[in-house]
Amino acid sequence: MSDTPKIEVSRRGFLKGAGLTAATTVIESASALAREAKEAVEGDRSVGPGSLPVKLQVNGQEHTIIIEPRYTLAETLRDNLGLTGTKVVCDRGSCSACTIWLDGTPALACMTLAIDVAERKITTIEGLSRGDGMHPVQAAFVKHDAMQCGFCTPGMVMSCAALLERNPDPQLADVKHAVSGNLCRCGTYPKVFAATLDVAQQRKQAAGLLTLDATKEA
Amino acid sequence: MAAEIVLAREEQQESTSGQKSVSKGVQGEARPTVEAEKKDAQTPPAANSMPTRNEMFVFGIPQEGLTQKEREVPLDEPPPLAQNSELKYIGKPTPRYDGAQKVTGRGKYTADVQLPGMLYARIVDATIPHGRITSIDTSAAEALPGVKAVHVIEHTYGIAELRDPKQESPSRYPVIRYAGQPIAGVAATSPQIASDAAALIRVTYDSMPFVVDKQEARATTAPAVFPGPADAAGSAGGGGGPKDVPQVGNVHGPQRKKVGDVDQGFAEAEAIVEGEYFTQVQTHSALETHGFLVDWKPDEVTVYASTQGTASVRDEFAEVFKIPKSQVRVITEYMGGGFGAKFGAGNEGVVAANLSRRAKAPVKLMLDRKQEHIVCNRPDSHQKLKIGAKKDGTLTAIALTSYGTAGVGTGAGTAGPATNLYKCPNLLTEEYDVFINAGPGAAFRAPGHPQGCFAFEQAIDELAVRLDMDPLALRDKIDDSPARRVERIIIRERTNWKNRKPAGADRGPIKRGMGIAQSVWYRFVNMDSSCEVRVSRDGSVELMSSVQDLGTGTKTLLAIVVAEEFGIPPAEVVIRIGDTRYPIGPNSGGSVTACSITPAVRNAAYQAKHKLFAAAAPRLGTTADNLGLRGGNVIFKDDGSKSYSFRQVAAKMPTSEISARVTRSPEYAKERITYGGVDYVELAVDTETGRVHIEKVFGAHDCGRPINPLGVISQINGGILQGISYALFEERVMDRKQGYMLNANLENYKILGAREVPEIEVELVENYLAQSSTDAAGIGESAGVITLAAAIGNAFYNATGVRMRKIPMTPANILAALGKIGQEDMA
């Protein structure tokens, strides 16, 4: 690989150069990345380009895989772990189809290097629902037909489920904001909004009933 | 390719390139086969030679009162279906058959399929817009550890070809005619190594002058994209353009259509409107890129394809590689969007197959996002339109000249709406294709129609202003379509239309307006549509066909049709589609799927049911004709006390299964049928920033008998949103100096996102036409995507008193139209 020709500085090349960065969000500023790259070099934390073993905690299971440091989390999940529910659409952080959760927070798997998240708890669409049944957001997507081709759907579901984790009572504008990075070419957004608001409504009603029950018992 | 799309084609008065040509993306020696096949498939059984019976069918639109229509139908057709309100599953909102698979990420798209020993491939594409390749050095790539095969492309498919190949001196490699044209492919053990290897392939060129600007390309002095006349075939989904038309320089055409005498029509006119309209190049941007996974084995080639036509892929693989169709198996279980872009083998499919054959391993080749933007597109347009009318609105003449570029392809015609929306005795349309050095045009959701409608439906509104008529009232006068008549009534009653103010009435900088536009699409039936319904002794029911589900909900649709016939819930029907090992179904383009395959499916279910009754009746102590279905149970017609579950009856069959294999029967009547919709838009224009905010859309649409309203409404929402995206945001930007597409990604090629979604309301109009055993039709084309740019244009005029004749309606284009900035201020 030593005679690999010089290619244009791509996002991936940049991340590779930055070594062990925590590139978990798209929004991180270039200066922050540069600072981390400097720290990585100074701290002699550089690895690669050869393969190395990496431990990943995915959906509650630990996997040890041997990958090159340049592999994105999206590639690793899909090609190495067979978790193909995480889709790659733009491969540069502009469509959110690859949305997964890192320690419960949505992140873009195509903009994350797998080696950078060895310590983190990764949740993919396959692990969203604990057990055999569907997560309420998944069930609501089916009920409302909040999908057409379905290629954006896993990312949409991850964004909407995360929204409900942090805001149990979202308004339409909150849902729009939560999926504002998730592109859907089939144009299924209205039903994505409806499905997410439906789950919030159901939960509110269920909580209301519980409160009523508690009052009765008291 | 699969069969001909037949409607009453002879009577079909449309002239858009989109649906006309149903020949191949793969050209050359293949064509005779295709023509032969067309003839076979087109020869319908002579209607008068087969036994028939007469039946009364529900007919018309419920809002106008349903009537009965008598039709002579083949004897083995099932009995007529009642209207939807009387049916158990058809017409009832039904959740998507594969919804759970999609929301849990378990559904395997072509991009997701992994086979043991599979290799990953990348395409190397041209870095210059025009020229000849002088050398390709693949040695460094081949030497890279992990690289298993390299393939250099010998022929570029899917672009126009010279009528006379001798006009170009022969060369070892295809001539490069656009930046991004595929040159070679490489397969390796990981995608990363494949990318490394692709970067090691050294290509040298002799560059030639190029042109990527359509206006420049029209000049006779412009660099010639082709050294002589060239034509492009269409694909199974449309695209392509007219052949045997003149070509001067890069200007190919016109394709001319003439009815009556327009000069006389304009002489008779009491009002004339005239204008020029400009639309941009749009890319399909399906989320799953084009791609194939090919497993080439000596006895069978298995192809996983992200395609709208498993049959078209099979046929083109067989043609390109000269292997029997029986040795090509194409599978499309889940498909991440096509919109017209994905038919046939494509260059990437041919490359993947060559790599697999060479490496003796399965090879997956998905285009990257940049390649997806370049591989095909919706052509742009520059239209000059003139309409003449009497004072009462009666149209006297329509004249349209359009120039569009489909890059290195053809098929940029826009005359569909002008030709087919309204009655007019005098019509002249002239459509030109202009070649430029850019990726080829292809079918894209209602080919030609969003462009044509943007001009035509705005001109009709302009005519309404000139005649001082309400735009809906003018259309009442000139539009023959019963469905659109009902849809206009719905729009009048259910929207704010009655509060519509005169144009430009708002005083402040934010101006609000409302507008409508109408769409037209055609009933295309692919007679080469077959399926099999199988019932097993345990009562399980399967439906099999090669037809594919692009996300339009085909699986659900078919489950509902089978369920209705057997009286079992749709979720209990097993749908096996998207595999050419099953009976060949239609390719999905031009809204053909529902109207082509659902009658075959219903007929197969009906026949299977009767075979089951015949097999089980003796063991139930009765005769087959005494058995019927009621409330999901099998009953004795002569004894109300006897009732069995479907499973109990199936258990009585003496063999382990019975099945019925059916091919689409002919249309019940040979009539010219169109579908359409009316879309209403409310918007606000900020005249200081040039931004448009769409506040509300109301769509009233017709697709014959709706089978699954839940899915149909999803598609209409999508059509409306794609239409808004086309009208306001999307535009391919070419670098005129370098010849590249500048925004081949999803951040600079802007498509509509969640925050640009307005409130949308949809009303479906049932329209019973007594044409087939299901009377279903597709909605993909007519849903919103055709109308929205025009409806937004009309609403913009209503808001500001200024007509937008150019899309996308970006702030720059809007401020220019409002006279707030000059052309010199624009980039």
Image (cartoon, helix red, strand yellow):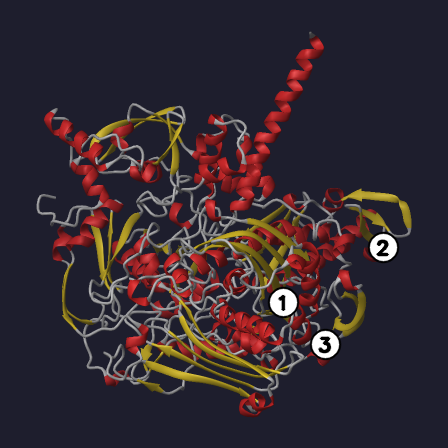
Give the mark, 1 or 2, whose residue is nearer the N terminus. Answer: 2
Q: Quadrant of the C terminus of chain B?
A: bottom left
Task: Find the distance from the CA under tag 1 to the CA under tag 3.
Answer: 15 Å
Asked if residue B775 shows in the view, the reply is no
Q: Are marks 3 and 2 on the same chain?
A: yes
For the residue labelled by badge 3, is the local secondary structure a helix, a strand or a loop? loop
Callout 1: SS = loop
Chain hosting mark 3: B
Report whether B494 appears left or right of B616. Answer: left
Q: Which residue is mark 1?
A: B664
Q: Nearer the viewer, residue B32 or B234?
A: B234
From the top left corner, tell me how far across and down residue B771 is, in percent: 69, 69
Give residue B315's quadrant in the image.
bottom left
Q: State the image coordinates of residue B647 (x, y, percent, origin top left).
A: 72, 43
**Residue denoted by label 3:** B50
Q: Is residue A173 left or right of residue B350?
A: right
Residue indicated by mark 2 = B626
Foreground mark, 1 or 3? 1
Whole-angstrom CA distance, mark 1 to mark 2, is 28 Å
Q: Chain of mark 2?
A: B
SS label for mark 2: helix
Q: Nearer the viewer, residue B616 or B606?
A: B606
Q: Given contact means CB atoms under 8 Å apart, are the residues at marks 3 and 2 in contact? A: no
